[in-house]
Image (cartoon, rainbow, N blue to C red):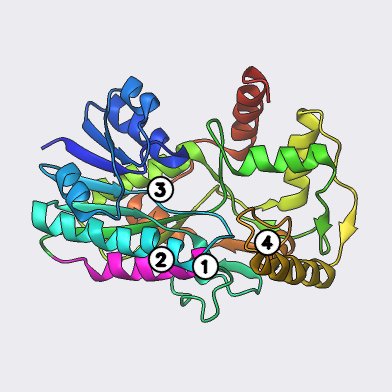
């Protein structure tokens, strides 16, 4: 059976994955809250619906051999209940639908934020425990969801979790556009020493990892019940990488600086103000964002290489060239 379901197939990762699956001749269904013309153009069937509705997920998963569960509420600001209902309850619905519909495999898109506790992470592997004090609602919800996905692994349904970090590339609607907007507005500062190393993941490499995971579950299943850090071969020095992009896009380089302590204090204050005024707009700074911008967070990816056979398909240099080309072609 070559029918698969991609939840969140209209989003950045989901759409790229959908295109890859369609190019392989798969019959692809996409489940997302909004109609996805781009997914249909790629050859997929677009199903409009919410993963929080079990009946909808059941209908979408019927007859599928694999579910790629990509849909999630991302970001670092918002009500906990919304994060919980989408990322946790929605994931439980996906698991339940897989069981009821006899879906053999579920590949879950997770995040390294599940292990980030406000301290630098340098070369840690998947044995590092979940964060005892997650730094945002998103991380809390993704911890619970990933645990449930991996717990669901059994002979009837094989599950695994892919943890890509800072996904970027053509089609990005979040990371690169936001960085450039803040850079052009002049309200982006180097937080901390500016020498922190971070993992990034080019979109084609993220898709490749998902496809490898599904293939593994369908054959040896050595990835079953496990999670995998995924990214470029080597981490980048965050602020040098951002400034390289800015130079290529004729955006002023970032030179202004702020200490991590000052950034976290500003984040704490802005969080309090936004919460008190019930503002939906994300604060310009939060404590979690300050830590992400100042600290190192890169990971040992040997498990993905050994078990999944993962190797980066697009280097960081190639990815930068392709991304800049896409940005300029699209008037960004």
* Front label number (4 vs 1): 1
Q: Residue 310 — which label?
A: 3
Residue 61 as seen in the image, left or right of residue 174:
left
Disc 2 crowd, CA 10 A, few/some/many (<14, 14-19, 20+): many
Residue drawn at x 40%, y 48% is 310
Magenta extent? 138-154
The Cα–Cα distance between marks 2 and 3, rounded to whole angstroms, is 31 Å
Whether residue 52 is situated above or below residue 1 in the rendered picture: below
The Cα–Cα distance between marks 1 and 3, rounded to whole angstroms, is 30 Å
Residue drawn at x 25%, y 53% is 53
Disc 3 crowd, CA 10 A, few/some/many (<14, 14-19, 20+): many
Disc 4 crowd, CA 10 A, few/some/many (<14, 14-19, 20+): some
Q: Secondary structure at mark 2?
A: helix
Q: Which residue position is annotated with label 4? A: 289
Residue 153 among those drawn in magenta: yes
Residue drawn at x 70%, y 71% is 272
Q: Secondary structure at mark 1?
A: helix
262 or 236, nearer to the observer: 262
Q: Which residue position is annotated with label 1? A: 137
Quick one: which residue is furthest to the top in this view?
Answer: 329
Q: For residue 198, which quarter of the picture?
A: bottom right
Where does the C terminus fall, quadrant-wise? top right
Kindly indicate whether the residue at mark 2 contacts the one at mark 4 (C-beta within 8 angstroms): no
Q: Secondary structure at mark 3?
A: loop
Quick one: which residue is furthest to the right in this view?
Answer: 256
The Cα–Cα distance between marks 4 and 1, rounded to whole angstroms, is 13 Å
* Residue 261 can be seen, yes or no: yes
* Front label number (1 vs 3): 1
């Amino acid at each position: 059976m070559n029918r698969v379901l991609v939840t969140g197939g209209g989003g950045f990762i989901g759409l790229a994955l959908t295109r890859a699956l369609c190019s392989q001749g798969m019959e692809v269904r996409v489940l997302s809250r909004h109609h996805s013309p781009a997914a249909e153009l790629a050859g997929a069937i677009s199903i409009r619906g919410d993963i929080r509705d079990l009946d909808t997920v059941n209908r979408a998963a019927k007859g599928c051999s694999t579910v790629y569960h990509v849909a999630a509420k991302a970001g670092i600001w918002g009500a906990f209940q919304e994060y919980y209902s989408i990322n946790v309850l929605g994931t439980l619905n996906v698991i339940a639908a897989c069981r009821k519909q006899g879906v053999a495999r579920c590949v879950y898109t997770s995040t390294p934020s599940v292990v980030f506790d406000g301290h630098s992470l340098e070369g840690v592997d998947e044995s590092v425990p979940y964060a005892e004090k997650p730094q945002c609602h998103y991380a809390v919800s993704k911890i619970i969801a990933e645990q449930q996905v991996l717990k669901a692994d059994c002979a009837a349904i094989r599950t695994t979790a892919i943890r890509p970090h800072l996904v970027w590339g053509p089609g990005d609607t979040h990371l690169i556009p936001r960085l450039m907007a803040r850079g052009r507005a002049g309200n982006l500062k180097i937080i901390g020493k500016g020498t922190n190393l971070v993992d990034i993941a080019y979109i084609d490499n993220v898709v490749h990892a998902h496809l490898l995971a599904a293939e593994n579950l369908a054959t040896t299943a050595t990835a079953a019940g496990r999670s995998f850090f995924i990214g470029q071969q080597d981490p980048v020095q965050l602020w040098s990488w951002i400034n390289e992009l800015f130079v290529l896009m004729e955006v002023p380089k970032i030179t202004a600086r702020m200490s991590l302590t000052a950034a976290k204090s500003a984040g704490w204050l802005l969080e309090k103000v936004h919460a008190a005024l019930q503002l939906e707009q994300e604060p310009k700074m939060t404590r979690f964002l300050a830590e992400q911008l100042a600290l190192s967070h890169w990971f040992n990816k040997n498990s993905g290489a050994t078990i999944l056979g993962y190797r980066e398909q697009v280097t960081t240099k190639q990815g930068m060239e392709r991304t800049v080309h896409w940005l300029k072609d699209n008037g960004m």
